[in-house]
């Protein structure tokens, strides 16, 4: 069960107390006001309940933030593309633009909502009420294959394979430029960025933060100012391919966070309306956690990426 978090520090601003607390804690003013009303805020060891009270710079504050209550996901009749299914697990070919599970800003319309409807609620409970059956994730704007557990035994068996890196995953990506060498292995530590907490970044090898990450890549086709490449993952860190390709100077086309579209391709992406990272989970392989059978599945590259490949292949390289 999640625990409360206590934020402490000193006020940098004078003026309205709620504004000074919001600035010092990085919480919104409305959140600060609600916590003050709940008796969760002290200033100089004294309970603070009046948002409009005068703040004094240098005062010590403490804010107790309760854990967020996880909302239970609800079934929704949303079409999904099923690549494999039995009584233990299901593999879905996720469309780009679909969020995997409910979270802040995406309370419904997710893959989990669709699966709860399709599987009539029969999903593993290990992931909690908001993430039933979810063993791994792919980004909202990444398309491709994702395995979901229906039972506890399947969830535990799949999780063990992800933990020991025996899951076989192959991605197709379109990156800017032509990586040199044309094939190779990227080995780094990946962790949360110091400058932007919403981004991941390559960290120094000596860093105590982050986790080791390994991506094998090779060019499949050189295109006009870009390349179709294959990436095979040994590890599965958040945004791993996006961060790794960026670290060698060849970010994914259309990536809104890590990418910078080559100037000569901006018109092409605009013409095609291509606004997502060009990344597709094309192949997924694992040992069935109950039967031991080897399962290997393939998902064709989606139409928007195929169109981008065809368009950039027509011009001189």
Image (cartoon, helix red, strand yellow):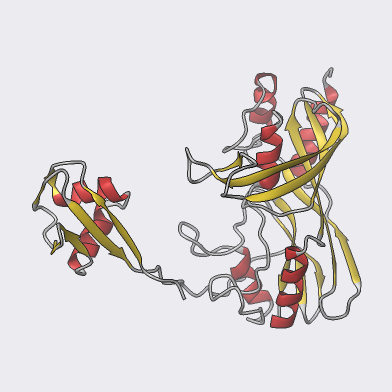
Figure quadrant of the C terminus: top right
Left or right, residue 226 beside residue 115: right
Which residue appears farthest toward the left when viewing the image?
54
- Dividing the picture into quadrants, the one containing residue 116 is bottom right
In the image shown, does 306 or 146 lie closer to the viewer?
146
In the image shown, does 184 or 290 lie closer to the viewer?
184
Left or right, residue 225 beside residue 196: right
Which residue appears farthest toward the right when viewing the image?
293
In the image shown, does 280 or 161 lie closer to the viewer?
161
Rendered residue at 69%/49% (across/down): 212
On screen, 251 above or below 140?
above
- Dividing the picture into quadrants, the one containing residue 256 is top right
- Dividing the picture into quadrants, the one containing residue 92 is bottom right
How far across and down, in percent of the image, does residue 88 sit? 77, 80
Left or right, residue 70 beside residue 222: left
- Residue 253 in view in this figure: no
On screen, 187 above or below 144?
above
Which residue appears farthest toward the front when viewing the image?
206
On screen, 202 above or below 3?
above
How far across and down, in percent of the image, does residue 48 sit? 14, 61
How far across and down, in percent of the image, does residue 115 sit? 66, 72
Rendered residue at 66%/52% (across/down): 237
Left or right, residue 202 beside residue 165: left
How far across and down, in percent of the image, does residue 182 sit? 86, 30
Rendered residue at 67%/41% (across/down): 242
Rendered residue at 71%/36% (across/down): 245
- Residue 310 in view in this figure: yes
On screen, 79 above or below 312?
below
- Numbered-mark total: 0
């Amino acid at each position: 069960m999640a625990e409360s978090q206590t934020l402490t520090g000193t006020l940098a601003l004078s003026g309205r107390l709620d504004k000074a607390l919001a600035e010092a804690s990085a919480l919104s003013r409305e959140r600060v006001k609600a916590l003050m009303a709940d008796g969760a805020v002290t200033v100089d060891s004294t309970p603070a309940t009046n948002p409009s009270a005068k703040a004094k710079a240098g005062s010590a504050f403490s804010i107790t933030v309760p854990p967020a209550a996880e909302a239970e996901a609800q079934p929704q009749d949303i079409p999904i593309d099923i690549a494999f299914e039995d009584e233990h697990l299901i593999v879905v070919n996720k469309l780009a633009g679909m969020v995997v599970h409910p979270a802040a800003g995406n309370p419904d319309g997710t893959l989990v909502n669709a699966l709860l409807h399709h599987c009539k609620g029969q999903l593993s409970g290990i992931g909690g009420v908001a993430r039933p059956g979810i063993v791994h994730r792919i980004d909202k704007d990444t398309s491709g294959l994702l395995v979901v557990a229906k039972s506890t035994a399947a969830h535990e068996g799949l999780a063990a394979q992800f933990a020991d890196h025996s899951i076989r995953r192959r991605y197709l990506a379109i990156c800017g430029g032509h990586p040199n060498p044309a094939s190779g292995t990227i080995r780094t530590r990946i962790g949360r960025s110091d400058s932007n907490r919403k981004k991941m970044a390559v960290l120094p090898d000596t860093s105590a933060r982050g986790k080791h990450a390994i991506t094998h890549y090779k060019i499949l086709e050189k295109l006009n100012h870009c390349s179709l490449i294959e990436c095979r993952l040994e590890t599965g860190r958040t945004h791993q391919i996006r961060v790794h390709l960026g670290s060698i100077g060849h970010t994914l086309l259309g990536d809104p966070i890590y990418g910078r579209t080559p100037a000569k391709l901006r018109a092409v992406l605009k013409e095609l309306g291509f606004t997502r990272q060009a990344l597709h989970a094309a192949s997924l392989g694992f040992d069935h956690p109950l039967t031991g059978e080897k399962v290997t599945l393939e998902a064709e590259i989606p139409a928007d990426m195929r169109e981008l490949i065809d368009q950039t292949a027509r011009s001189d390289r």
